[in-house]
Amino acid sequence: MIANEKNFLSFLRAPKQFRIPIFQRRYSWENQHCEQLWHDVLRIGENNDISSHFLGSIVYIGEGIMQAAEVPELLVIDGQQRLTTLSLMILALHRAIKKPNTDIGIKPKQLSNYYLFNADEDGQLRYKLLLTNQDKSTLIQLLENRELSSDASPRLENNFNFFETKLQNADLKTVYAGIKKLVIVDIALNPDNDDPQLIFESLNSTGLSLSQADLIRNYVLMGQNFDFQSKLYNDHWLPMEQRFGDAYAKKFDLFVRDYLTLERRQIPNIGAVYETFKNHVPRKITPEKLQSKIAKIARYSNHYVSFALEKEEDSELQKCFSDINILEVTVAYPFLLEVYDDYKQGNISKLETVKILHLVESYVFRRAICDIPTNSLNRTFAERLMPNVLKSNYLNSLKETFLKLGEMSDTYRFPSDSEFKQEFQVKGVYNNQKRCQYLLRKLENHNNKQPIRHIEDYSVEHVMPQNDDLSEEWQKELGENWQEIHEQYLHTIGNLTLTGYNPELSDHSFSEKKELRPGGFRDTRLRLNESLVETSIWNESAIQTRAEELAEKALKIWIYPKLTDS
């Protein structure tokens, strides 16, 4: 390794080309990063007492390092974001000084030929910086002042526009003076002696914002020969990134943790996913085995995207996944990865898959209603279920495993019908609006040929109003102990329904809420409101009666596993 402090512009000026390897993350600096760089450049440009400003390190390796090549091609290990952003700033400055009577001490052609282009070269060697396939064409279009394509990189386009806008009202000499004071540490790695992956890891340990996904991608691809590296990336890794889309940065680490949990039956800490992955895919592995492992990870990533990001194409399965996700039961994802893979591999039918998903949903929902702590769920789904499932008798053996959970520990139990029914009637369920809408939607849509399709069109309505200062009419309706009834039953299922007319219903009396047009209970034609329409007075007895009716329906929706039901 050779490390030298260098002036940034001097570093760029000699003929060279920085190439971002295909496995590096895309250009990702946002507006706040550009704003900070712009502020630093102006500050040092305006202050004659500041002779330099340290920008950070640029780490690279490549065939040209140890050769007398005319244009060395250097692979950037770290520094892509700074290199790219400063190139955008210099390009914007180049266009700004092309205007008549603009003199900053360097001509436009010199600025571009010294720092943006290798002036004596043709083709791709003409460019000082080549980004990955996804960003390369956009940067070249900007450098050549061509019209940007419809799929142009938004980060590059937005950040270039940011600098163009800033330069319209800036002193251009000051900007150039600031750029000239920027200093970097030039770190050239020796390809024979230095391990780029170790360097990459050490950079991450200093606090740079590299995700576990960044480390994993580089670990898999760095050090492979170019052809094999390209094959792994193009056949497996790039399709994974494309499937995740904008969610890649936030969700891929979570997917890898869930995948490793499935493989190891043990949950790694989210901050230790990379270290766990290295144990799962050791460095000394044959190309054939590496490709096989990455292909398997790619296959499971497709499953994850289908259920976790809800991109499933089958509408029935999609509804199942959506309901599970509303319950925020992400600890079930390793289990779902295996179930979904078995479905895709043809080991279980779609009908069996749907029933399994309903069991998972019922298990989680019943436990929530019965206030069973959730801290045991991760081990349940990671360690307790699938290892005990006989895949030759998949559905029934899973039901049997669910039933036996309570024998291991009461905290693992699948609440019985009697426990669930009792708690369902008395639990306050309004504390989470999204889950409350889910609960009411499921009750409304059960065996309904005209189901609610857009729950967002409805809001939760309290039959007995939330207002603590109830009207005299409501106090009379509820009876002598109206305060206790209000406090005890306000947010329970017996007192809740759905409406598209929440403001109109407001705190009106029960009879007015029934008969109001439009929007009254009689007018809405929701099944949830049928018993309300038939009730003459809304008091404790009426709330209890309706709660019991809905609890009976809930038993048919959030089912208890029965081995005789195949």
Image: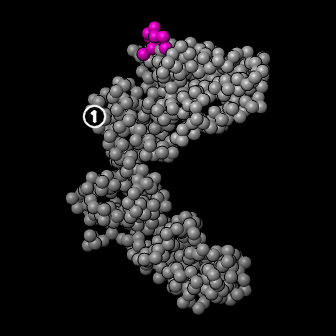
Q: Residue 298 in the image: x percent, y percent?
A: 36, 43
Residue depicted at x 49% and y 61%: 326
Could you tell me which secondary element the residue under label 1 belongs to?
A: helix
Q: Which residue is mark 1?
A: 289
Image-based side of 5 in relation to 38, left or right = left
- Segment tinted magenta in the rendering: 63-71
Image-based side of 74 in relation to 36, left or right = left
Q: Taking 423 as reference, is 189 above or below it?
A: above
Q: Residue 454: tell me if it is visible.
A: yes
Residue depicted at x 35% and y 24%: 225
Image-based side of 254 in relation to 477, left or right = left
Residue 70, magenta (yes or no): yes
Residue depicted at x 48% and y 15%: 72
Quadrant of the frame with the C terminus: bottom left
Furthest toward the left, the residue is 392
Q: Residue 55 in the image: x percent, y percent?
A: 63, 23
Residue 187, magenta (yes or no): no
Instruction: Identify which amino acid the numbered label 1 is placed on.
Output: Lys
Circle 1 Cα neighbour tier, 10 Å, few/some/many (<14 / 14–19 / ≥20)? few
Q: Taking 176 as reference, is 136 above or below it?
A: below
Q: Nearer the viewer, residue 346 or 263?
A: 346
Q: Quadrant of residue 412?
A: bottom left
Q: Residue 303 in the image: x percent, y percent?
A: 37, 51
Q: Nearer the viewer, residue 172 or 226?
A: 172
Q: Residue 277: tell me if it is visible.
A: no
Q: Taking 379 as reference, is 407 above or below it?
A: below
Furthest toward the top, the residue is 68
Q: Quadrant of residue 558?
A: bottom left
Q: Nearer the viewer, residue 257 or 348?
A: 348
